[in-house]
Image: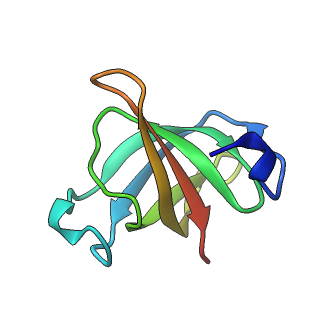
Amino acid sequence: MNENTRISKRFAYTSAVSFVPLGISGSSLHAGTVGGETVNVSNEGMCLRVKKRPIKVGSVIQVRMPVHSLKVTVPVLSEVRWIKEETPMYYTIGVRFIS
């Protein structure tokens, strides 16, 4: 995605996260819970880094965002907008919040 087409500014933010593909779109790749980390976040979405490609563009996932000061996670419903292979082992995933 071109940086100039973004609605909100992204902020660098690194934190461990996990997500679950919900099987609404791309359900053939349902993979259970996937671990990764955030790269950046904005009002509309975030970028995640994972070690494998467990989902397809258009998939709906539930991201578990940690709230470190409270030691809890908050579920955030998101849609996968793009996936980019960084190396044969690592992918970055752009998601848009839908809840």
Q: How is the image coloured?
A: rainbow
Q: Is residue 51 left or right of residue 58?
A: left
Q: Is residue 80 left or right of residue 2?
A: left
Check the image and report above or below for 35 versus 30: above
The residue lying furthest to the left in this view is: 28
Q: Is residue 82 left or right of residue 85?
A: right
Closer to us: 6 or 90: 6
**Residue at the spot 37% in from the left edge and 66% down from the top edge:** 59
**Residue at the spot 63% in from the left edge and 33% down from the top edge:** 14
Of the 4 image quadrants, the one containing the C terminus is bottom right
Residue 50 at x, y percent in the picture: 39, 37
Residue 61 at x, y percent in the picture: 41, 66
Closer to us: 20 or 9: 9
Residue 88 at x, y percent in the picture: 28, 23
**Residue at the spot 29% in from the left edge and 43% down from the top edge:** 53
Check the image and report above or below for 56 versus 58: above
Q: In this view, does 85 lie to the left or right of 81?
A: left
**Residue at the spot 55% in from the left edge and 57% down from the top edge:** 95
Callout count: 0
Check the image and report above or below for 82 versus 52: below
Residue 17 at x, y percent in the picture: 49, 46
